[in-house]
Amino acid sequence: VVEIGTPDTATITTCAYCGVGCTFRAEMRGEELVRMVPWKEGKANRGHSCVKGRFAWGYANHKERILNPMIRASIDEPWREVSWDEAIAHTAAEFRRIQSTYGKRSVGGITSSRCTNEETFLVQKLIRAGFGNNNVDTCARVCHSPTGYGLKTAFGTSAGTQDFDSVMAADVVVIIGANPTDGHPVFASRLKRRLRQGAQLIVIDPRRTDIVRSPHIEAAEHLALRPGTNVAVLTAMAHVIVTEGLVDEEFVRTRCDWSEFEDWAEFVAEPRHSPEATELMTQVPAANLRAAARLYATGGNGAIYYGLGVTEHSQGSTTVLAIANLAMATGNLGRDGVGVNPLRGQNNVQGSCDMGSFPHELSGYRHVSDDAAREMFRDLWGVEIDREPGLRIPNMLDAAVDGTFKALYIQGEDILQSDPDTHHVSAGLAAMECVVVHDLFLNETANYAHVFLPGSTFLEKNGTFTNTERRIQMVRKVMQPRNGYEDWEVTQLLARALGCDMKYSHASEIMDEIAAVTPTFAGVSFARLEELGSIQWPCNEKAPQGTPVMHIGGFARGLGKFVRTEYVATEERTGPRFPLLLTTGRILSQYNVGAQTRRTENSRWHEEDRLEIHPHDAEQRGIVDGDWVKVVSRAGDTSLRALITDRVAPGVVYTTFHHPSTQANVVTTDNSDWATNCPEYKVTAVQVGRSNGP
Ligand code: SF4
C-alpha cells in the first residue's frame, strides 16, 4: 500500500480515454500528479471509473514523450531538434511552397478525437480559413461516420438520442455490435444495475461477450450472427414486427413520414426477409430472431445501444438506418428509457464531428454548400469558405499516390496504425512532400513525417470534451504543458505564420466563437459550464439548460424518415483459401492502438493480443492454446498466439488490436462503407495456421 497523503491541490477534469466521459479529481503534490479520484458530482460517471481513467495517466511523464520540435529534409534522414520558432516557420514555408506549386487543394489536415473541441475547431479553421479548402477529416472516418450519416438521415441529428440515466427507465435493452463491459465500462455498470432490476436483454453479436452472461444477468436472446449480416438480421426483425402487427401505428402516423413508412413496410414484409428465409445466411435461428423482435416491440420501453460492430462494415450506414427504422416502427423514441444510442469510442469523437471535422460539413453539421452557414463564417472570419467538399482520409491518400495531394497536418492521430490497408497508407504518406505529425510520441505515422510538433496531454490543457451523450464537460489544466504549449496554441502559431488571423489568449475564447457560429452550441460558454457542471447539446434559446433526451414531440428533421435497407453481402466471402471470418474488439485495460495505455502500469494486465479461435477450428488445424499462429488475408498477414475458446462460434476468429506487433490492419482489407468510407474492420476472410512466431 502506498500512502498518498493529503494532496496540495486538486483539479476537476475529464478522462481522455473513452466516450463515457468520467470526471476525476486530479490530486497534485507540488508539480506531481499523485492520484485520479473519480468525482461523485460527475454526471456521466457519478463517482465511478474504470482502470484506464483511474490508473493509466503515467504516459504524461513517460521517457519516450517528445518535448522538442524536430524537422528533417527527408524521411531517410535523422531528426534534428529545433526551436518552436524554426519548426513553425519551416512548416508554414513548406505548406506555402506546396500550395503555390500544386494548388490550394494539394494540402489538408486531420483533427484528433483525443483533443478538445476548441483544438479541433481550430484545426478545421486553419484548413478552411488558412489553407482555403475543405480537406479536413477525423478519426470518426474509421469509426462512427456511419452514425453521423444514418442518424442525420433518419432523425435529423448526428448524435445519440438519450443520456446515460435514461437506461434506468428501459424495460428491454438491445446491444448490437458493442461490448460495453470492456469498451464503456462505467456505462456498463449502470446498464447492469438496470438488468439486475429486471430489464430484459437482447445481444446481437457474433461473439459471446461478457454482458451475455454475467453474475445475475442472462440475456433473453443472444443472436450470434455471422459477421457481416447485421442488415439481414435487423431487416428480419422488422419483418416480424410488421407482419405480426407489432408496429406502433400512432407514433408512426404522428411522428414519421407515413408514405415512406408504407414503402418500407411493404419492403420488409417480403417473404425473402423472413427469419426463416434468412436463417442460413445469418446463422441466427429463426425462432430466436422472432423472439427477439417480439420482445423489443412489446416488452415496454426498448432502448438500443450499439458500437463499432455496427458501423465498421461495408453496410455500416445501412445498419444504422435499419436500427433507426426499428426504433421508429415501435415508437421507441422521444422519451426516457428508449432511443438509439451509439457508444462512441474516443473521449471526444462526438465533439470532433460536432466541430466541423468532416470535409463536407461545417460545425453543427451544416453542409459546406449551405449559403446561410457560409455567410455566418464569412462575417466572423472574413474569408470565403470553399463550397466544394474536401477529401476524406482515404481519398487524401489516393490523391497522394496519384501525385495531386502533397502535404498533411495530423494532430493526435496515428493513421498508419489505426487506418485500414496499412500498405496503402504508407504508400500515400511516402508520396507526400511534407507530413507534419503533432503528437505526444513518435508514433508509427511519424516514420513518414518531415516535421514533428510535440503535443500536450489532457492534463496540460484547458478546454472541453463532448461525450457520447452529447455532454460537454470541462477539461482543466492540472499542470503546465511539458512541451511548452497547449495543442490549440501550436495550431494558432502555425495559422499565424500562414497569415491566418487568430488572436486567442484562452481556450474559452475559442468556445465563444464556436457558440457564435454553431446554433446547437449557442448557449454554451465556459462560464455556463462552470455554473451547470456540464451541458448536453443542443443548448440554445429553445433549450437553455441543454437537452438530455432528444426528439421529444418531434424529430430534429421534422418527420422521421424510413429508408429501405437492402442487405448486400460483403465482398469478404469465405472459401477454401480463406475459410474463417476475422473480427476485432477491445479489452478493458487497454485503449485503441495502446499509444497511451501501453506506456502505463496498465500494460501488465494485457501483455499481448491473442487470436480467439473455436476449439473445433483449432483442432482441425492442430493448434493448441498458446501456439503461435499466422493469420493470412488477401491484404496481408500477421502472427500472434492462439487462445482457444467457445466465446467465438466455429468459423469466426477474433482479436484485440492494442499492440503494434499485432498489425491487425495489415490483415484488414480496403472494403469500406458505401456512404462514408468507414473501413470494414469487422469482417475479414482469413486463413489461420500454426507458425513459428513473428
Ligand atoms: Fe470512464 Fe471511459 Fe475513462 Fe474508463 S476510459 S474512466 S469508462 S471515461
Image (cartoon, helix red, strand yellow):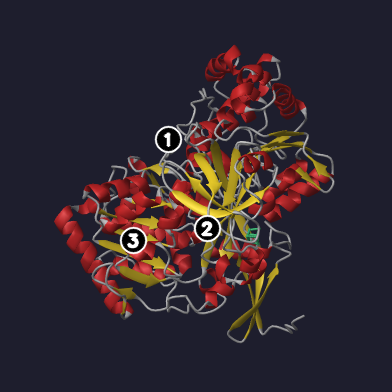
Callout 3 secondary element: strand
Which of labels 1 and 2 is toward the front? 2
Q: CA distance from mark 1 to mark 2?
A: 39 Å
Contact between labelled residues 1 and 3, with CB atoms less than 8 Å apart: no
Between discs 3 and 1, the one toward the N terminus: 3
Residue at 48% x, 52% y: name it: 638
Task: Give above or below for 540 relative to 295.
Answer: below
Image quadrant assignment for residue 301: top right
Q: Is residue 503 visible?
A: no
Residue 202 lies left or right of residue 101; in this view the side is: right
Between discs 3 and 2, the one toward the N terminus: 3
Viewer-nearest residue: 261 or 433:
433
Callout 1 secondary element: loop
Q: For the view shown, which residue lies furthest in the bottom direction?
A: 30
Which residue corresponds to mark 1? 675
Contact between labelled residues 2 and 1, with CB atoms less than 8 Å apart: no
What amino acid is labelled 3 in the image? Tyr
Give residue 483's position: percent from left, percent from top.
Answer: 43, 78
Label 2 packing within 10 angstroms: few (<14), some (14-19), many (20+): few
Looking at the image, in which quadrant does ligand 1 appear? Answer: bottom right
What amino acid is labelled 1 in the image? Ala
Which residue corresponds to mark 2? 693
